[in-house]
Image (cartoon, grey):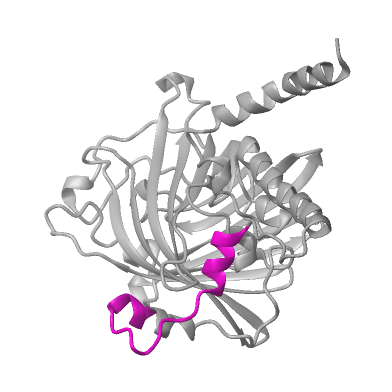
Amino acid sequence: MPFKTFEHTAMMRAMLPLLGSLLSSAVFAEDAATFHPVSATACSGILSDADRLVCYDSYFKAQQDSLVDSKTETAEPKTYAAPLQAAAEKPVATEDDDSLKAKLARSLHFIYSADASPMSANQSLLDSRWELSPQSKLGTWNIRAYKPVYALPVFWTSNRNELPHSANPVNTVTERQNLNFTESKFQLSLKTKAWENIFGDNGDLWLAYTQSSRWQVYNSEDSRPFRETNYEPEASLIFRTNYNLLGLDGRLLGLSFNHQSNGKADPFSRSWNRVMLNWGLERGNFALMIRPWYRIPEDAVDDNNPDIENYMGRADLTAFYKWNDHNFSLMLRHSLRSGDNSHGAMQFDWTFPIKGKLRGELQYFNGYGESLIDYNHRASYIGVGVSLMDWF
């Protein structure tokens, strides 16, 4: 067999597994040509192994071709990230353009300034999570992690909620449930960018979905039922910012529409809709997310939990810190009211390395509203398990 024919055959055989992997991921991502990474680190946040490999291939192929072109051509080198760079370098709308979009682009341009530290996926926690800087943009419809993904086989509570109740009598349980103190909890959370650079070179629309379940897996007496599952779809408009405030770099400002429900019938049904403000700051290995929200009112007759804001709060604050291979997060939530309506909660999570990519998770919760069915029930919870995807 001629050498070239043998070489081509071997290359085709080597490429078959890769082609199969790429084809299998087609339902989750766009064609490989849609990836225009400006840096290799921008590819690291993609959830799918196949899509992440395509992203890396796109980046290094562009670098290799650019090097070859520089040796063989006297003209300017080719730009393989043209769509991304064009968006990043797009000028702010001129004063002569009176369209609504142009006016918004001119106003939002001033959100960004150069007062804070330079932003890059290598150094910025929030940038690595939200693709804020032009160098981190990866286009649309790539599946990424949102909130932590974990499985806690042991989730123990100090106070079982055997008679869930609500200010709406229709949503008050009258028959006591048989519950174990120890159950299991797991959470799945994903997001994808649906629209990039909506206003000039800023403003991305993200869609997210989070699902968390509490499973009475040790309750063989009642056939191991799922006690509570919360469903949380969300849409967020996220803007890049860059300013300094009290020693922290303001990186992110956003607005979200959030729906949360447990998908059950009365009297167990619980749900609410919120409009949230997202405010993100960071410095080094520390990040802070502040989220005040407004609950969209419901008719009194249909409201499963009319007093939910006085228990699950009107705002929360989550702090993150990375130390070596250990990640820590602390969530604080409060009703922002005094007297009998003053209620809140805190949750602490610690993830740590076990072996290789396997990571452990320790979770502690104290207060009201660990889940929607327990929105006005106070208890402490301790969970131990494995972390499959962290905040950062």
Compared with 364, 296 (above or below) is: below
Q: Nearer the viewer, residue 168 or 243?
A: 243
Residue 181, percent from left and from top: 51, 37
Give the quarter of the figure containing the N terminus. Answer: top right
Residue 106, percent from left and from top: 41, 84
Horizontal side of 333 relative to 322 (left or right) equals: left
Q: Nearer the viewer, residue 225 or 230?
A: 230
Is residue 387 visible from the viewing direction of this image?
A: no
Magenta span covers which residues?
81-104
Q: Find residue 306 and report its image quarter.
A: bottom left
Q: Residue at x 48, y 52 (%)?
A: 140
Compared with 18, 294 (above or below) is: below
Residue 264, percent from left and from top: 28, 38
Give the quarter of the figure containing the C terminus. Answer: bottom right
Q: Residue at x 21, y 40 (%)?
A: 266
Residue 108, percent from left and from top: 43, 81
Q: Residue at x 54, y 82 (%)?
A: 112
Q: Residue furthest right?
A: 3
Is residue 337 visible from the viewing direction of this image?
A: yes
Q: Residue at x 83, y 21 (%)?
A: 4
